[in-house]
Image (cartoon, rainbow, N blue to C red):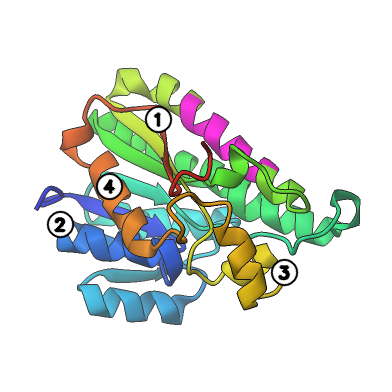
Amino acid sequence: MRLKGKTALITGAASGFGAGIARKFADKGARVFVADINAEGAGEVAGKIGGEAIGVDVSDAASVSAMAERVLAGGRLDILVNNAGITHLPAPMEEVSEEDFDRVWAVNVKSVYLTARAFVPAMKEAGRGAILNVASTAGLSPRPNLNWYNASKGWMITATKTMAVELAPAGVRVNAIAPVAGETPLLRSFMGEDTPEMRAKFLATIPLGRFSTPEDMGNAAAFLCSDEASMVTGVVLEVDGGRCI
């Protein structure tokens, strides 16, 4: 019960890695807010783990502010997990549409700014807190034709480190995890097509020979957001089966 007594918010938690983190946090004793643009999916996950669902568009300032008002009305927020993310389909960088670029940047980048603006002041006032950003191996060892997604995750890694430095005096820790592709709704988008041949091609780049799972992310997140990691900040933990070696 390493998270007993703590309140956590996970964005993009209606499926995939976010749902895995939400399940693990609840299992470890946390009160969990399951936030997602898919409010129905968030409700299903929350119902299974005894959490609370919030429908939110993390790229929209008003929506994030409304979420923060609801969460903080019940007291402090101990753990914020910025997991929500999207990608564009594989394509040469100059062929990705401006609409797709803007959406990737809004969800993967602007959302981290918006949640920081909404929750960091309360964490500073409390003198404690843990923020976890879900980055990607794409930000460390990029694949061709996912250029703007790669860049957004590279930004998140840099943001994690600079947030950690700035917030350390206030007692707030900021870390990131970098998963490799996993069994999530984004897998097909990363690959372009979900075929046995394409899966084999992806798996050949992962020394441990399997995709990341939501359970893998939950395990790593639970440690980094717990008091057991009280001396860990500014770290980007590769949970990738050796992909970045």
Secondary structure type for disc 3: loop
What amino acid does circle 1 point to?
Answer: Val
Question: What residue did someone put label 4 on?
Answer: 77
Between tags 3 and 4, which lies in front?
3
Q: Residues within 10 Å of mark 3 (few under 14, many from 20)?
A: some
* Residue ID for mark 1: 235
Where does the magenta region start and end?
151-161
First in sequence: mark 3 or mark 2? 2
Q: Using the image as rendered, state which of residue 7 and residue 71 is in the foreground.
A: 7
Q: Nearer the viewer, mark 4 or mark 1?
A: 1
Identified by mark 2, the residue type is Lys
Q: Is residue 113 above or below residue 93?
A: above
Residue 140 falls in image quadrant: top right
Camera-side mark, 3 or 2: 3
- The residue that disc 2 covers is 28
- The x, y position of residue 152, in whole percent, is 65, 44
Structural crowding at the residue carrying mark 1, measured as other residues with C-alpha within 10 Å and reported as few (<14), some (14–19) or many (≥20)? some
Q: Amino acid type of disc 3? A: Gly
Q: Nearer the viewer, residue 209 or 193?
A: 209
User: Does label 3 or label 4 sit earlier along the sequence?
Assistant: 4
Where 29 falls versus 186 (above or below)?
Answer: above
